[in-house]
Image (cartoon, rainbow, N blue to C red):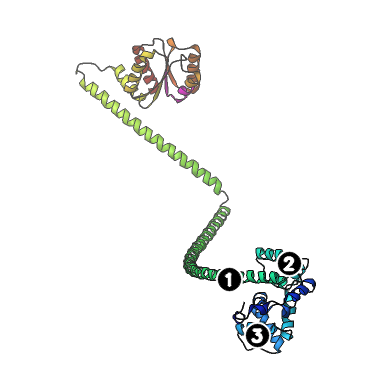
């Protein structure tokens, strides 16, 4: 309700009872200028947006109305009191704008039905078209119109309060949006810096990659050139491969010769040491004592056992330690096989292959072991002494015999 209508007597807003009775009996919708004067302000304010209202007024005055929104609203409300060009334009615009709502209200056959449709529109939150349809409906009496006007008045108050709340919330949202915008700007700056750092790192990695690729290409080119040189050299020397094999064989032979020379030098040193020992023994003898040629021969022969591997096949288990001691005192390495009691034939073959000299104690070995030892030594030419008595004394005699045989 506008301020210019607030001081008018209420009697002007309601027609006589006879007119109300004739209106309720009619089936024609009421026109805008036929509505009570107190309905014009809310109808214009609620049902027509200001932009649409200004266009209609400009069309009605056939020009451009130089007035603000309030003046346009007040002028349009004043024109609604009578039928004229502007009120006709407003009537047609309202009917066209809310044609679907008017069609829905057309089925209402009583004021209660109109009020039910009006309450449904309030519940749905779409009151502009329902407001126009309820006020102009043929079954809307003054009670219905007054009720609709009162409720629309309160809806406008609530809308104003909601607008103020929404405005306050809008201001809060603006402040929050400003804070978020600042934070977003900082995040974008950090992101830009991070992207710049990553771009620099990527450039460095790409530069390193290009350098590595260039180095690889250079190495591959060098390898290709070397291969070409080798191919050219091989083509220029037809027997290069045979010469290479011969040189390898020559190198191997030289290594073996050096090993033999080293072994020969070691044997010469051992012979010299044995000779010195023999000279010392001869010097220690009395002048009138004759030199025993047999002892000298045994001393010289014992030197032949140095660094040799001597295999003892058989013998008493309790005497093995004594066998080992006598063998190592003579300078040889000791190996033992029990002749088939616990050690297998495969181990005997391996020991025979690794040994340089063999002492076989025939009194305590199996027939299989005996024939294996005899056959191997005969086939390979290894010196072998057979001892019948497995005593330490017999082993000592066998050790002297094997030494003499090794000298020969």
Report helix, strand or loop for mark 1. Answer: helix
> For residue 137: magenta?
no
Indicate which disc residue 135 carries.
Answer: none
Circle 1 residue? 157
Label 3 CA crowd tier, 10 Å (few <14, some 14–19, many 20+)? some
Rounded to the nearest angstrom, the CA distance separating label 2 from label 1 is 25 Å
> For residue 359: magenta?
yes
Indicate which disc residue 111 carries.
Answer: 2
Report x, y in % for residue 347: 48, 21
Give the residue drawn at x 65%, y 76%.
42
Give the residue drawn at x 38%, y 35%.
261
Report x, y in % for residue 248: 49, 43
Q: From this viewpoint, is residue 383 visible? A: yes
Residue numbers of the magenta segment: 349-360
Q: Which quarter of the rendering shows the N terminus?
A: bottom right
Label whose residue precedes the other's in the sequence (1 or 3)? 3
Q: Pointer 2 and pointer 1: residues touching (CB < 8 Å)?
A: no
Circle 3 residue? 75
Report helix, strand or loop for mark 3. Answer: helix
Label whose residue precedes the other's in the sequence (2 or 3)? 3
Q: Nearer the viewer, residue 134 or 284?
A: 134
Rounded to the nearest angstrom, the CA distance separating label 1 from label 3 is 23 Å
Label whose residue precedes the other's in the sequence (2 or 1)? 2
Report x, y in % for residue 186: 46, 68
């Amino acid at each position: 309700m506008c301020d210019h209508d607030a001081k008018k007597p209420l009697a002007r807003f309601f027609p006589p009872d006879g007119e109300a009775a004739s209106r309720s009996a009619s089936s024609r919708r009421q026109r805008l200028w036929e509505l009570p004067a107190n309905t014009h302000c809310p109808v214009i304010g609620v049902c027509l947006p200001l932009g649409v209202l200004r266009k209609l007024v400009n069309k009605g005055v056939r020009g451009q109305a130089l007035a603000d929104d309030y003046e346009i609203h007040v002028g349009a409300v004043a024109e609604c009191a009578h039928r004229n060009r502007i009120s006709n334009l407003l009537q047609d615009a309202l009917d066209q704008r809310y044609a679907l709502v008017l069609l829905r209200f057309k089925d209402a056959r009583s004021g209660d039905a109109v009020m039910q449709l009006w309450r449904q529109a309030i519940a749905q939150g779409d009151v502009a078209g329902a407001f126009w349809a309820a006020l102009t409906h043929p079954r809307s009496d003054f009670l219905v119109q007054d009720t609709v006007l009162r409720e629309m008045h309160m809806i406008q108050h609530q809308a104003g309060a909601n607008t103020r709340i929404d405005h306050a919330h809008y201001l809060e949202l603006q402040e929050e949006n400003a804070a978020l915008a600042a934070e977003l700007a900082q995040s974008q700056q950090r992101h830009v810096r991070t992207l710049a750092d990553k771009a620099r790192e990527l450039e460095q990695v790409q530069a390193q990659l290009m350098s590595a690729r260039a180095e690889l290409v250079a190495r591959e080119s060098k390898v290709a050139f070397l291969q070409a040189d080798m191919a050219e050299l091989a083509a220029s020397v037809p027997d290069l491969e045979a010469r290479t094999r011969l040189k390898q064989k020559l190198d191997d032979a030289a290594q073996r010769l050096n090993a033999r020379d080293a072994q020969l030098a070691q044997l010469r040193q051992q012979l010299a040491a044995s000779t010195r020992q023999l000279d010392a023994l001869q010097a220690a003898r009395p002048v009138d004592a004759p030199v025993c040629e047999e002892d000298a021969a045994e001393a010289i022969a014992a030197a032949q056992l140095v660094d040799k591997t001597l295999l003892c096949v058989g013998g008493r288990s309790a005497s093995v330690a004594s066998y080992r001691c006598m063998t190592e005192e003579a300078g040889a390495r000791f190996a033992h096989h029990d002749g088939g009691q616990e050690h297998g034939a495969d181990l005997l073959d391996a020991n025979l292959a690794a040994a340089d000299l063999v002492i076989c104690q025939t009194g305590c070995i199996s027939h299989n072991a005996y024939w294996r030892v005899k056959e191997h030594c005969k086939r390979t030419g290894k010196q072998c002494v057979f001892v019948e008595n497995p005593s330490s004394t017999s082993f000592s005699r066998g050790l002297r015999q094997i030494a003499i045989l090794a000298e020969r």
